[in-house]
């Protein structure tokens, strides 16, 4: 690719990546990440041509990591001189990545990249005339990235390598080789800075460039090391299709219940397995969700295994404090650091018993088959025959293993089974109160009554049991059966 054709490439590629010319979209402001190396210098020259042609705002930024002493300072001075010569605004910042690498237990290269992207975001947030960030990653970088991800183990997203557009970051040089960049700079008479650590370092990328790629070329011929970059281009088209379907699935399935994000499990699991995993990932890493960098394939596999054996009320913790909870046919996402809904303390409630007579029309009054009535936020009433109560009444919190002989059913049932049947979420079960006498539970407050509390005859002697928080005044003074 000679000088004129590379100039045309910059114009076309930057138009495409920034959306310029689509339905009258004006050219957006562009920020170029400038290290001083040949890739970023060539990108800045090409961006200057594009910005002048499109009347777009152009700026550059340089982050000095202070890892190479005076050489790093010389890089910063070179970038400043180049920008002054071109009339381009330059943002400069200094930050050592080593403390971040130690705190995260990550590699130095990863920490430096994280700092650069944080620097980009800060500049964009503080400058309304800038919208895109362009970096100088080229075809050789793409090939190296795909090879590294292949041997580390990756899926379709990883095999697509460096994406042309990632958020507000664009990569205009992915189809341009390093040799083409160097040739163009020489034709322009433009010098650049050289970082010897890129070739001499002990990090994975440097060793791959120095040791593995020459071996690949010796086996498969010159140019063979660019094949991974072509593979990434093929994956890119397939991923676009998957992304469209994932967006549609998330838009259709994701909603909230009780302020918590949730997915309907039957519809989620009906999707193709590849789409199920992508939908889960997108949903989990959406607004208010997990950090995408902390969600790995093993976590998605664990979720699938858990969903196959889990029951309503069970939970699964993920990195970063994210917790999944199965609530019948729904998958809820919560923060494991959040407090659970407060448990009702039975000691804060009292029981009052008042004599009464059942009305003639007990059906319409709701006493024959009802589960009691609620006369206030924390006050419930249940009317039953007076002769069925045995001994003292007390109110307490429900416990695992509690049983009741439910109204209209044969035999006793576990309360946990009733909760499941009535689809009471696990968190809400903490708030359930029960009333019992010497023979067992007669009332699951507001939810179920025992068969022996059935009112068989209108007008028979009866009592109204009232469970109320100790605060309210209840108009009832007769507590004897």
Image: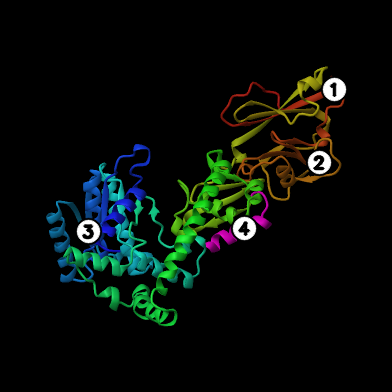
Residue 84, picture quadrant: bottom left
Of badges 1 and 3, nearer the viewer stands: 3
User: Can residue 251 be seen at all in this image of the molecule?
Assistant: yes
What segment carries the magenta color? 296-313
- Identify the mark nearer the N-term, 1 or 4: 4
Of mark 2 and mark 1, the one earlier in the sequence is 2
Observer-nearest of 406 and 131? 131
* Residue at the spot of label 1: 460
Question: Does residue 66 appear left or right of residue 107 in this picture?
Answer: left
Q: Secondary structure at mark 2?
A: loop
The residue beneath circle 2 is: 405
Instruction: Give whichever of discs 2 and 4 has the lower sequence position.
Output: 4
- Label 2 – label 1 distance at C-alpha: 22 Å
Question: Marks 2 and 4, how far apart in space?
Answer: 37 Å
Q: Quadrant of the C terminus?
A: top right
In the picture, the disc for residue 404 is none
Q: Which residue is mark 4?
A: 304
At x 29% / y 54%, what residue is drawn? 8
Circle nearer the viewer, 2 or 4: 4
Q: Are marks 2 and 4 in contact (CB under 8 Å)?
A: no
Residue at figure coordinates x 44%, y 82% from the top left: 219
Relative to 361, does residue 452 appear above or below in the rendering? below
Which residue is identified by label 3? 62
Q: Are marks 4 and 3 in contact (CB under 8 Å)?
A: no
- Nearer to us of marks 1 and 4 is 4
């Amino acid at each position: 690719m000679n000088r004129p054709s590379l100039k045309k490439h910059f114009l076309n590629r930057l138009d495409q990546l920034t959306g310029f010319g689509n339905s009258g979209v004006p050219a957006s402001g562009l920020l170029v990440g400038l290290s001083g190396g040949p890739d970023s210098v060539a990108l800045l020259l090409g961006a200057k041509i594009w910005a002048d042609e499109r009347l777009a705002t152009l700026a550059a930024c340089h982050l000095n990591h202070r890892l190479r002493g005076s050489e790093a300072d010389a890089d910063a001075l070179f970038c400043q001189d180049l920008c002054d010569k071109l009339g381009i605004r330059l943002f400069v910042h200094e930050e050592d990545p080593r403390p971040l690498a130690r705190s995260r237990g990550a590699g130095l290269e990863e920490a430096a990249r994280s700092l650069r992207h944080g620097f980009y975001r800060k500049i964009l947030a503080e400058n309304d005339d800038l919208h895109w960030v362009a970096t100088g990653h080229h075809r050789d970088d793409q090939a190296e990235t795909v090879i590294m991800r292949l041997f580390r183990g990756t899926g379709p997203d990883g095999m697509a390598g460096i994406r042309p557009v990632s958020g507000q970051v664009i990569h205009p040089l992915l189809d341009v080789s390093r040799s083409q960049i160097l040739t163009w700079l020489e034709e322009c008479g433009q010098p650049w800075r050289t970082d010897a650590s890129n070739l001499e370092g002990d990090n994975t990328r440097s060793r791959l460039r120095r040791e593995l790629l020459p071996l690949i070329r010796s086996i498969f011929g010159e140019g063979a090391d660019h094949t991974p970059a072509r593979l990434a281009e093929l994956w890119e088209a397939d991923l676009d299709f998957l992304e469209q379907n994932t967006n549609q699935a998330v838009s259709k399935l994701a909603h909230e219940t009780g302020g918590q994000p949730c997915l309907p499990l039957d519809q989620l699991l009906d999707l193709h397995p590849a789409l199920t995993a992508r939908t889960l990932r997108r949903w989990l890493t959406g607004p208010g969700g997990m950090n995408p960098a902390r969600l790995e394939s093993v976590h998605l596999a664990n979720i699938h295994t858990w969903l196959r054996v889990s029951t309503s009320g069970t939970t699964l913790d993920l990195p970063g404090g994210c917790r999944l909870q199965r609530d019948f046919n729904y998958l809820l996402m919560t923060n494991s650091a959040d407090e659970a809904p407060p448990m009702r303390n039975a000691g804060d409630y009292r029981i009052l018993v008042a004599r009464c007579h059942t009305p003639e029309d007990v059906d319409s009054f709701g006493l024959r088959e009802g589960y009691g009535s609620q006369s206030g936020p924390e006050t419930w009433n249940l009317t039953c025959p007076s002769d069925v109560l045995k001994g003292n009444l007390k109110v307490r919190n429900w416990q695992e293993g509690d049983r009741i002989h439910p109204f209209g059913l044969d035999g006793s049932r576990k309360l946990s089974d009733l909760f499941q049947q009535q689809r009471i979420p696990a968190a809400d079960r903490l708030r359930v109160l029960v009333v019992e006498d010497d023979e067992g539970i007669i009332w699951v407050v507001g939810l179920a009554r025992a068969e022996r509390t059935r009112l068989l005859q209108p007008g028979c002697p009866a009592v109204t049991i009232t469970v109320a928080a100790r605060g309210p005044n209840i108009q009832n003074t007769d507590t004897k059966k």
